[in-house]
Image (tube, rainbow, N blue to C red):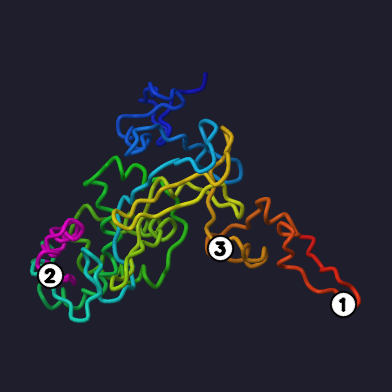
């Protein structure tokens, strides 16, 4: 028998699930093992996958179309360079209001005390009082670019269990021009809160940049990004074995089996449009996520018999010319 570890975080302080008996869980992560509506056990665990780092692996045979897991964002917020929009509900604002406490853009007094905006509002209001209105006004653009990163970083004291998952995610990608704005906010005002350290802020911005997923809103609303700790463990395959469905009401993501998945198989998703030709797919994956895909689809030079990347040989030859590597 192997070590008794939580299926999600690897903690040794774990007990076996009495229902499925496939996994062990710690006290903080039982909620991630249960499907919310049915109460059934989610058939996955996090483990090291050769050549891919940590990934999600099936703990039992999974039937086609079976609901595998539901993921919620640990934090959501506006994109770092977003249009004028409410910091709480994301409504686009042709004539924005200012939160009377911290000065950030909101659509109404109701949203100035909304649950999302309150995360940063109290923290920023204290800083605004200390630095004065002139410096605060000069820094407001940089502060608004930092909101989502602040919401993620504040999980350290707001929700340590969620932070344990978020803080362990990869942090190998960051837009330097956006970081310059966030660092400006740190240098001028954010450093006043002793819980915020520059190196940790940079690390969290990297987590946000590497693992952030677009949040979709209806027409009339702006752009948002969320970090989903469980979904972030899904590795890529151009022939992924799962499908993802987003519920815009609560921004939850539901994962379903695209085909039957045997126990012990890695669960995969596609980071890109998988119908693109192989060369385009591989270049996009490398340029965006810094890896060369070597999945079965990328090793099939016929591309499932579609010959998308084939070149016409000559008017006398009906066959395509295919790449060998």
Q: Name the residue under label 1.
A: 314
Give whichever of 228, 146 is nearer the camera.
Answer: 228
- Answer yes or no: do the residues labelled 3 and 1 have beta carbons within 8 Å? no
The correct choice, above or below, for 96 with respect to 300 in the image is below
Per the rendered image, the range of residues in magenta is 102-125
Residue at label 3? 273
Q: Where is residue 3 in the image (x, y as percent from the top left)?
A: 47, 23
Q: Earlier in the sequence, mark 3 or mark 2?
A: 2
Q: Which of 272 and 287 is in front in this view?
A: 272
Instruction: Point out residue 91 in the picture as x, y percentages from the top left corner.
Output: 24, 70
Residues at marks 1 and 2, CA–CA distance in whole angstroms: 66 Å
Q: Position of residue 232 (x, y in %)?
A: 44, 50
Q: Is residue 233 magenta?
A: no
Which of the numbered marks, if any, corresponds to residue 42?
none
Residue located at (48% from left, 40% from top):
66
Secondary structure at badge 2 equals loop
> What residue is rendered at 22% in x and 81% in y?
94
Q: Identify the residue at the far bottom of this view.
A: 94
Nearest the viewer among 176 and 289 is 289
Q: Which quadrant of the structure image shows residue 325?
A: bottom right
Give the side of residue 215 with respect to residue 43, left or right. left
Quadrant position of residue 265: top right
Are the residues at dot 3 and dot 2 in contact (C-beta closer than 8 Å)? no
Residue at x 44% of width, y 58% of height: 210
Which of labels 1 and 2 is toward the front?
1
Question: Which badge, 3 or 1, comes first in the chain's sequence?
Answer: 3
Q: How crowded is mark 1: few (under 14 residues within 10 Å), some or many (20 or more)?
A: few
Which element type, helix, strand or loop, lies under badge 3?
loop
- Say whether residue 112 is magenta: yes
Q: Mark 2 points at which residue?
A: 108
The residue under the point 82% across, 69% down is: 320
């Amino acid at each position: 028998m192997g070590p008794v570890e939580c299926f999600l975080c690897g903690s040794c302080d774990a007990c076996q699930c009495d229902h499925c008996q496939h996994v062990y869980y710690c006290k903080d992560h039982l909620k991630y093992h249960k499907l919310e509506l049915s109460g059934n056990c989610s058939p996955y665990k996090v483990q090291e996958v050769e050549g891919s780092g940590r990934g999600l692996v099936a703990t039992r045979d999974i039937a086609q179309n079976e609901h595998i897991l539901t993921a919620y964002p640990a934090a959501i917020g506006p994109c770092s360079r977003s249009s004028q929009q409410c910091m709480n509900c994301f409504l686009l604002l042709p004539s924005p209001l200012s939160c009377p406490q911290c000065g950030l853009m909101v659509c109404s007094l109701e949203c100035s005390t909304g649950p999302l905006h309150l995360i940063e509002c109290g923290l920023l209001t204290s800083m605004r009082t200390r630095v004065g209105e002139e410096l605060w006004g000069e820094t407001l653009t940089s502060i608004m670019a930092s909101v989502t990163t602040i919401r993620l970083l504040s999980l350290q004291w707001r929700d340590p269990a969620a932070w344990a998952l978020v803080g362990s995610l990869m942090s190998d990608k960051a837009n330097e021009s956006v970081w310059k704005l966030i660092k400006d906010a740190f240098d001028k005002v954010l450093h006043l809160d002793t819980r915020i350290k520059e190196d940790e802020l940079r690390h969290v911005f990297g987590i946000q940049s590497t693992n952030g997923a677009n949040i979709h809103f209806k027409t009339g609303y702006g752009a948002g990004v969320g970090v989903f700790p469980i979904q972030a463990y899904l590795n890529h395959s151009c022939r992924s074995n799962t499908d993802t469905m987003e519920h815009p009401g609560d921004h939850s993501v539901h994962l379903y089996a695209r085909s039957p998945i045997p126990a012990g198989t890695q669960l995969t998703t596609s980071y890109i449009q998988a119908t693109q030709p192989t060369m385009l797919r591989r270049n996009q994956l490398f340029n965006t996520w810094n890896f060369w895909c070597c999945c079965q689809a990328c090793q099939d030079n016929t591309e499932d018999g579609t010959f998308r990347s084939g070149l016409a040989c000559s008017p006398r030859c009906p066959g395509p010319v295919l790449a060998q590597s």
